[in-house]
Amino acid sequence: MNELTHFDESGASRMVDVGDKPVTSRRAVASSLVRMKPATLASIQEGGLAKGDVLEVARLAGIMAAKRTGDLIPLCHPLPIEGVEIDFQAVGDDCLGIEVRVKTTGKTGIEMEALTAASVAALTLYDMVKSADRGVVIERTRLESKAGGNSGNWTRREGA
């Protein structure tokens, strides 16, 4: 197992010192699934919910969350985000997939920003539809890929 970098030799929490790391282009992709009643998904797709365009509200929430990740995750470095893209796609008749792509040029990775954006977009979807469907389940929020930095590129293998 790799060393846990957010703890020092005595086990105390620390923010990793990235001062000597090179500035590189970094990208990360994260995803989440939101499972719901088929009728709820159909209403979202048709724009038929009283709260308005649910997907655009969730997209905006995800973008805002990516920008605030350093404020939300205690040992996360605040990063200058250069771009965030969030897409939604139906997965069957009862699930909505969220894919987030984030990029920056910096000294540390952008994975936490992508994961935070996917999580908050999913939570926002729940909030927007809970009056119609209390049984919504947020599942499988995960990193799909990352590029850049000392550790190089990583992509999730199928089935992992």
Image: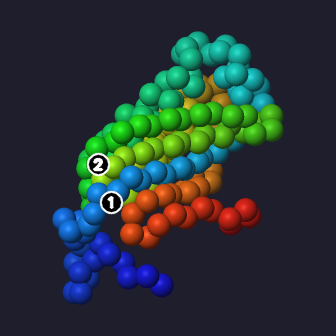
State the residue in front, 68 or 108.
108
**CB under 8 Å between callouts 2 and 1?**
yes
In this rendering, the answer to whether 8 lies above or below 152 is below
Q: Amino acid at mark 1?
A: Thr
Name the side, left or right, on which 48 lies relative to 53.
Answer: right
Whole-percent x, y for residue 37 in the image? 74, 33
Q: Residue furthest right?
A: 92
Residue at image location 30% in from the left, 53% down from the top: 106
Crowdedness of circle 1 by 10 Å Cα count: few (<14), some, many (20+)? many
Judged left or right of residue 77, residue 26 is right
Residue plotted at (62% across, 50% down): 139
Is residue 110 visible in the rendered image? The answer is: no
Disc with the residue nearer the chain's start (2 vs 1) = 2
**In the image, is residue 75 above or below residue 56?**
below
- Cα gap from disc 2 to disc 1, whole angstroms: 8 Å
Foreground residue among 158 and 134: 158
Residue 159 seen in the figure: yes
| Residue 105 at x, y percent in the picture | 33, 49
Q: Residue 80: x and y, percent?
A: 28, 44
Snapshot colouring:
rainbow
Quarter residue 22 falls in: bottom left
Q: Which mark is residue 79?
A: 2
Query: Residue sitting at 47 percent across and 67 percent down?
Result: 152
Circle 2 residues within 10 Å: few <14, some 14–19, many ≥20: many
Residue 101: x and y in percent read 51, 43
- Location of the C terminus (image quadrant): bottom right
| Residue 109 lies in quadrant | bottom left
Q: Nearer the viewer, residue 52 or 68?
A: 68
Query: Residue visible at 36% across and 39% down?
Result: 82
Q: Which residue is mark 1?
A: 108
Q: Look at the numbered disc 1 and give the secondary structure of its residue.
A: loop
Mark 2 element type:
loop
